Image (spheres, rainbow, N blue to C red):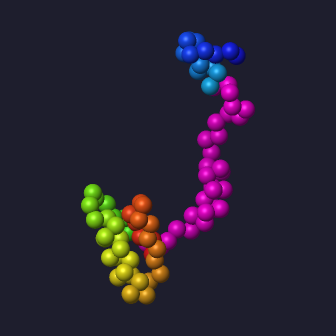
């Protein structure tokens, strides 16, 4: 198929629909293998989610300090603002 920028939309759609060697796999098997590799299938028993627009990092840091001093094993992920215990 020789497509150009001026080719009709139907031709472009046909090209895109047929360009992959395999139909779309809507199952979760591919995702499960990634989750297994990242050890995500056994999540922490408790997760604290901190929301809002300001001071999420400070709040997470404060909670982490409290939990560590209380001898809880915890880890913070500041990018997504949650603490897993």
Comparing 63 with 43, the one in front is: 63
Residue 47 shows in the view: no
Q: Residue at x 60, y 59 (%)?
A: 35
Q: Is residue 63 above or below residue 3?
A: below
In the depicted structure, whether residue 53 falls above or below residue 59: above
Q: Residue 33, relative to residue 74: is it above or below?
A: above
Residue that lies at the very extreme toward the right in this rendered image: 21
Question: What's the residue at 55%, 12% (across, down)?
Answer: 6
Q: Position of residue 21 (x, y in %)?
A: 73, 32
Residue 28, position in %: x, y?
Answer: 61, 49
Residue 4, how many percent across, how many down? 61, 15
Residue 66 lies in the magenta stretch:
no
* Residue occupying image coordinates x 61% and y 63%: 38
Total labels drawn: 0
Q: Read off the magenta span.
A: 17-46
**Left or right: 73 as drawn, with respect to 21:** left
Q: Give the quarter of the figure containing the N terminus.
A: top right
Image quadrant in which you'd find residue 12: top right
Residue at image coords 64%, 36% = 24
């Amino acid at each position: 198929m020789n497509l150009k920028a001026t080719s009709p939309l139907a031709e472009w759609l046909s090209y895109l629909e047929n360009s992959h060697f395999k139909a779309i796999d809507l199952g979760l098997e591919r995702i499960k293998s990634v989750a297994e590799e990242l050890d995500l299938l056994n999540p922490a028993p408790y997760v604290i989610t901190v929301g809002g627009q300001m001071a999420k990092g400070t709040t997470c840091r404060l909670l982490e300090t409290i939990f560590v001093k209380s001898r809880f094993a915890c880890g913070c992920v500041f990018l997504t603002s949650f603490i897993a215990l």
